Amino acid sequence: MRAILRFFLWTVAIILIAAGAIIWYFVYRPLPRLDGSIDLPGLQQNVVVERDHWGVPHIRANSAEDMVEAQGYVMAQDRLWQLDLLRRVGRGQLSEILGPVTLNVDKQFRTLGFARAADRDLGLMDPTSRAIFEAYARGVNHFIEQHRDQLPIEFSLLKYKPQPWQPTDTLVISGYMYQTLTNHWEDELDRAKVTDRVGWERARDLFSPNAAMDHFVVGDPNVVNDGSQRSRVNADDEDDDDDDDMEPDGVLKASATPTSWSATASRRLSELNKATTPDSVPDLTSALATSICDFLEASSRELRHSLGSNNWVVSGNHTATGKPLLVNDTHLELSIPPIWYEIHVTAPGWNVKGFTLPGAPSVVIGHNDRIAWGFTNNGADVQDLYIETFNPAAPDEYRVNGKWVKAQLFDEVIHVKGQPDEHLPIVVTRHGPIVRRDNGKSYALRWTATEPGGLSNAYNWQGKAQNWEEFRSIMKKVWGPAQNAVYADVEGNIGYVMAARVPIRKKGHGEIPSPGDKDDYEWTGYIPFDQLPQALNPDSGLIVTANARVVGPAYKPYLTDRWEDPYRTARIYDLLHDKHGLRPSDMLKVQTDTYSYPHVFLADQLSAAAKITAPNDDRTKKLIDGLKDWNGIADADSPEVSFLVALRSTALALILEPYLGNQTHLYRWRTTTFLQKILTDRPAKWLPPAYKSYDALLVAAADRAVAKLAEDSNSPRVEDWPWKRFNPLEMLHPLGREGLLKKWLSITNKPQSGTDYSVRAATKTHGPAMRFVANLANWDESILIITAGQSGQPGSSHYSDQFPYWYEGTPIYGPFTDPAESKSRKHSLTLTPAH
């Protein structure tokens, strides 16, 4: 027995030692060096990288190029696999490492043409900007060269090594973010289908840009313009806004001529949708590939529902210090590693701290020692679909003003792991690539992202601005994506500017696909910067944007009618407009507020309806009784919240089913605003014939909602329907969607409060991807938080160390001055020029 026991103990010991060695080799050995000295060829002088106890680096350099090269190196230290994944997504190169399961994703991005656009835009850059992008690439590449045998574990799991970083990779990732924030061309197709089925009269209701709870930043006819508000005011009816009289900026002419990419394709149009029959790939790689593909598709699906962002700025009249407070939380995919990365960069002309994106030099959102700024997505319509007519006798020709013109053809070669290369023919007309062929129609996409200069003129240089005019001057050069920028400075000024290239259309607004064979619907230029919505020091001392409508009927140029519902904006206004003595901690409380306006409205409407029409289901009655004590907070433990969320969907579906049948999902605009207006005004034309009144409709929708909750939960009991069961937080690593990798790499199944319409907007995988509160009175008391941690490597202590603070709504203050940073300094690394 002793011998058997000794044998057993030795076996266990050997297994544990072997397991420890494997874990060390793949998990801890790749962790980067954070102290000492490392040679970094390309530097002109030494650069010091100091990290605090959160792993946030402060890069101290003697030139902008050295600063950015060090930033590329540091980003690769923490997020190399994320960098590589994002550029592969944008370039359409996932199948090269994952096999055929990601072919559809690759085809989508190859069709959009970001790689070709990036090559062109790099050539258009001025020498100074190009030098910055090249310096960043050098930094990433030096890390890759030094660590080819010590790569993060994702490279080991997928059995590949990263290729050298190109300056164009930064532009390709910029295109990926552009796609994330402005890619709504499929909505135009759906809008056309909805309009066709409901008719133009009802379509005006469905797609109305108006909402009772909107708060306009500019163009409000009820607000006297004191001269500081920069807006083009026109008293005409807001529907009379075809912009036919708009004079486009002469410097910013929009070219409709396709870029002269060298065409290599010889396949004809009939091959465009060639089917693929991929063979199997190794089990692990296949599982990981499926995981990534599911991750990207889920992200795209959520983003089409446009869960938005918040930002606001209050003047010193509202604060305890007499200086402004500026607040931002961008709502994006809640992934691990996070999309945002915190950094502080210092060089002559630069002293900036804030948040940057993988692949992006400098800081995208943050503050320097004079100003602070933040962004939310504006949603300006910068994509148009054109219906192209192709020649049946010559399928590579399409009609332009009565003549046949040859389309550009490209043969995109997609390398597929374990299989022969896939050839994807891309067809490009004067408007852009053919992105969809449906019912004999071919749709070409025109998009500012792929116009010359679209990818290179993004949000990287705001940190150099020292005042409002310099900030506006930098914003004037931005192409997009269109953002609502809020601004504050140490002098006490607060401001707003929307920057982007927004097309001026010859006719119409591009809400649905337009005929492409004539010039009637062409772009004639872009809205001049001075006519884009801007404001400085409004009398209210408060500017709020949350993706809802920012321009009122007195604002003339057309931006979009695809605004988000106004409930988050309205809630922020209600919490702040009459407050004084505000501090950063108060701003964090607003950011984490989970009150849900539309569900309060539905609760009131349903409670009144149930007094007239009794529900059929006893569970419905029980839930309606529970609404009497509900305070509007979307608490994770509340079954009433689950009920009201389901009710919103079922009530909307009952109203639309007579026209859209089982395809009510095609309608995705201001859906809740529309529902609220219908239930408030109760027009006879929208009441389905099956119901005698809107009260009856609401109660029927409530019974249907209860049945849906029972089905989705696999339980008939109301007690089993808390909101956390239907909307748990799923913060996923792209490889961590199933099994042991999910438990190890991801943070999942966490109860969370809030709905789509709360200030703390929350779905399973989307929400506030960062939180930022800039304290203009004391930069060291500014709040900066990301969702998980600085490092993308699971062996790092900074893989998810910020998560508890983000999850609980607890502040993390970001030191900025040298004395404050010295107190939190944990690591110091010197990067030296190679000898």
Image: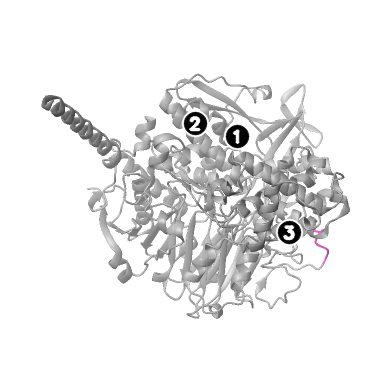
Residue type highlighted by circle 1: Thr
Residue 624 position by quadrant:
bottom right
Say whether marks 3 and 1 touch (CB < 8 Å): no
Residue picked out by circle 3: 607
Instruction: Identify the secondary structure beneath mark 3.
Output: helix
Vertical position of residue 504 compared to residue 512: above or below: below
Our reading of the magenta stretch's main secondary structure is loop
Q: Residue at x 38, y 52 (%)?
A: 790
Q: Residue at x 40, y 63 (%)?
A: 812
Which is nearer the N-term, disc 2 or disc 3?
A: 2
Image depth: mark 2 or mark 3 in front: 3
Residue picked out by circle 2: 290
Residue 181 position, x and y percent, is: 59, 49
Q: How many marks?
A: 3
Foreground of the two, 270 or 308:
308
Residue picked out by circle 1: 111
Residue type highlighted by circle 3: Ser
Residue 103 position by quadrant:
top right
Residue 507 position, x and y percent, is: 80, 50
* Residue range of the region highlighted in magenta in the rendering: 236-241
- Rendered image: mark on residue 470: none
Instruction: Identify the secondary structure beneath mark 1.
Output: helix
User: Residue at the front extreme?
Assistant: 618
